């Protein structure tokens, strides 16, 4: 023996466990999948040819859990990326835009709450360009108004302060 450490010959051995981004991400996916799976236990899978309301969420939960478990296993092989700082800008602005939309849809209507939510969520990315955001907000709002208000005839207020509905 030449005194080299095991695994120094170029093979890719299992490294000792440590907390890495992949490990945390995989465990998070497994946790979310378990919550979704056990949260749908009161729903039926269906019988025979009939699909029940619990089949799809449980199937997606199983797939998500499988992918999470695979990521956990693979986190022990290959490059080990340490956990860096937690970026809160993205999740806070996206969650804030959803809350803002929910709070403002009845009072401002879809014509104003929609673009407002798109603009606030676009602040999650530092590289967003104002002109692109405005064009995307206008296009998405027109699409939503056409789909939900006119095609599906849902009772969503359009612009109550201007149109009365």
Image (cartoon, rainbow, N blue to C red):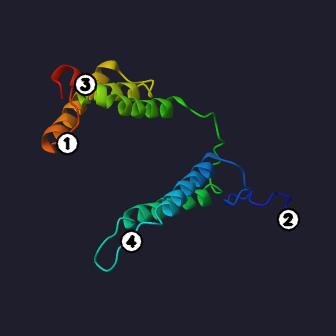
In the image, residue 58 sits, relative to residue 99, either above or below, namely below
Determine the secondary structure under disc 2.
Answer: loop
Estimate how packed mark 1 is, as few (under 14), some (14 to 19) or many (20 or more) residues with alpha carbons within 10 Å.
few
Residue for badge 2:
1
Residue for badge 1:
154
Q: Which of marks 3 and 4 is in front?
A: 4
CA distance for labels 4 and 2:
60 Å
Residue for badge 4:
45
Residue for badge 3:
135
Estimate how packed mark 4 is, as few (under 14), some (14 to 19) or many (20 or more) residues with alpha carbons within 10 Å.
some
Lower sequence index among marks 4 and 1: 4
Query: Residue 110's image quarter?
Result: top left
CA distance for labels 1 and 2:
77 Å
Lower sequence index among marks 1 and 2: 2
Lower sequence index among marks 2 and 3: 2
In the image, residue 153 sits, relative to residue 4, either above or below, namely above
């Amino acid at each position: 023996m030449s005194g080299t450490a095991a695994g120094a010959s170029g093979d890719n051995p299992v490294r000792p466990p440590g907390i890495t981004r992949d490990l945390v991400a995989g465990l998070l996916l497994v946790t979310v999948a378990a919550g979704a799976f056990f949260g749908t236990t009161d729903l039926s899978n269906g019988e025979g040819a009939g699909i029940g309301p619990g089949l799809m969420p449980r199937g997606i939960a199983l797939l998500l859990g499988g992918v999470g478990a695979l990521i956990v296993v693979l986190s022990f092989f290959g490059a080990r990326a340490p956990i860096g700082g937690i970026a809160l800008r993205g999740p806070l602005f996206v969650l804030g835009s959803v809350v803002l939309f929910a709070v403002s849809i009845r009072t401002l209507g879809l014509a104003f709450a929609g673009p407002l939510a798109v603009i606030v969520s676009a602040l999650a990315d530092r590289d967003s360009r104002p002109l692109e955001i405005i064009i995307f907000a206008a296009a998405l709002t027109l699409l939503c108004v056409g789909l939900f208000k006119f095609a599906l005839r849902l009772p969503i207020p359009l612009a109550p302060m201007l149109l009365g509905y």
